[in-house]
Amino acid sequence: MLDKVQPLRMLDQDPKTIPLDQIDVSQAELYEHDAQWGFFERLRKEDPIHFFDHHEYGRTWAVSRFDDIAYVEKNHEIFSSEPTITIADPPPDIPFQSFIQRDPPEHDSQRAAVQPVVAPMNLAKLEDLIRQRVGVILDGLPVGETFNWVDEVSINLTTQMLATLFDFPFEERHKLTYWSDATTGAPDVSGGDFITIEERNKALAECGEYFVRLWHERANGPPGNDLISMLAHSEKTRDMINKPMEYLGNILLLIIGGNDTTRNSLTGGVLALNQFPGEYDKLRKDVSLIPSMVSEIIRWQTPILGMTRRTKQDTELFGKQIKKGDKVVMWYISGNRDEDVIKGDPNKFIIDRESVRHHLSFGFGIHRCMGNRLAEMQIRVAWEEIMKRFSQVEVVGPEVRAPSNIIRGYRELPVQVHPL
Amino acid sequence: MTKVTFVEANGTEHDVDARNNRSLMQAAVQNGVPGIDADCGGQCLCATCHVILDEQWYSKLGTPDADEEQMLAPTPERSPTSRLSCQIQVTDELEGIKVILPEFQM
């Protein structure tokens, strides 16, 4: 049997001249170097439903235009989220199942059980707590000294938020971040290098034990407002503990969903304002633009690069013949730069852009991000408090990104803060 | 043009001259009515244009189809007479309709 040829390394290619059929946008290091843009411009213009037969991932179709992505999102009966939503096949070592990787009806009933944790009334209660914590973090930042915004602010804040949502022991909250990064940062899941497969399996076994223990504690106590308590007491899900792979999958989903997406948007906003200083001026003059800026940050950052669907039957997609079982990848990172849809120049960061909420970062359709308002709230409150304290959060060194074909994230952003 | 009234959760009313053959959502967005986000631009994919009708209008306009229902189901203030306003076409038939906006969109 002939082995498939390894694809060309995209980082070595000129996106303007590479033959179209050799473009492979699944390479994790592309995103580590923020070098994907030229390739997606070619695809949007010349091959919006782009086939690539990958030596590891198999038959893939890269969908790069906004409206085409929305179409795939809508037609979930054909474009399934099972068995998973990553380009990579689910690693056999981690057989967890969550509702993000399920189609209706299972998706609908499981999501319905956990959705109340982000109900608007709950979020309203959390806002004061978030504001208080942001204040403590910002007031503790060193002035006149370079530090890593990712660690000191982005990770710090989002981890605290996660611990609250789960009512997780506060002093152990770093475990949540670790388990989340272990799941998304392994080479067999996203082409990442955060952790080895062996260490990942060990980490998730610990995670599993921990959450099974927490379930039993919460199930035996009175119903609370935290996620585990909700699952343990809700009629629809109180038996989920008997399906441990489903329970742990859903827990991991919520940890991941609440983790690096918000984290990387908190970092991305700082970077964007520094790359577009005119927008930072605009913001200083009018902080009522913060809610609009939050949406623009989320569009510009696009914390989830894309989501994958697998076709349940042969189908046609805008002239291309898709076979049953093919992987159709909705590249949000490209759709969010679609000049035919985004009003104004999509490659610029514009905090008062028209139709600023019209972006793909939360996805669309039945799987649309459940935590979107919580994410927006955290970023909004963070910027409200930043603007009360600092005339500038100044980026003083190059950002360092992480390799991944799922998450668009930062490891480092060296900054200095300047008080008002 | 058809006269339509949007009522915010806090009771503020907005009278709008809605264009026929556009959606009720577009009437809200184009007239700056707060409380409708329409993040997906009207494709029944985000459920952030949720409105609540009174029973009479709900019966008159018909129940949501399966796609709309699936998006409506998880909305925080889902009521028996909820609709997604991007799926309601403005026609002369809607003259004088009053729709309530929920306090929160999803």
Image (spheres, rainbow, N blue to C red):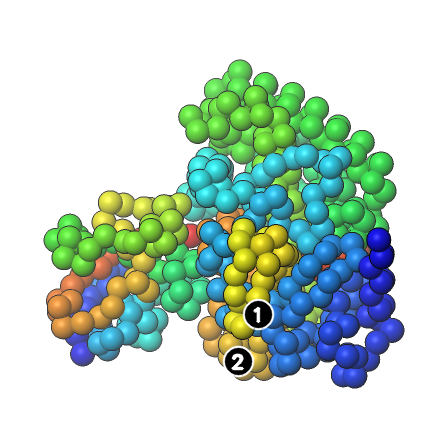
SS class of the residue under badge 1? strand
The residue carrying mark 1 is A320
Res B84 → quadrant:
bottom left
Compared with residue A417, is residue A197 higher up or lower down, i.e. above or below? above
Question: Can residue A415 be seen here?
Answer: no
- Image location of residue B88, percent across then percent down: 26, 64
The residue carrying mark 2 is A340
**Horizontally, is A27 left or right of A163 in the view?**
right
**Horizontally, is B27 left or right of A170 in the view?**
left
Compared with residue A420, is residue A170 higher up or lower down, i.e. above or below? above
Inter-mark Cα distance, 2 to 1: 21 Å
- Image location of residue A205, percent across then percent down: 75, 29
Q: Residue at x 67, y 61 (%)?
A: A60
Q: Chain of mark 1?
A: A
Res A206 → quadrant:
top right
Q: Chain of mark 2?
A: A
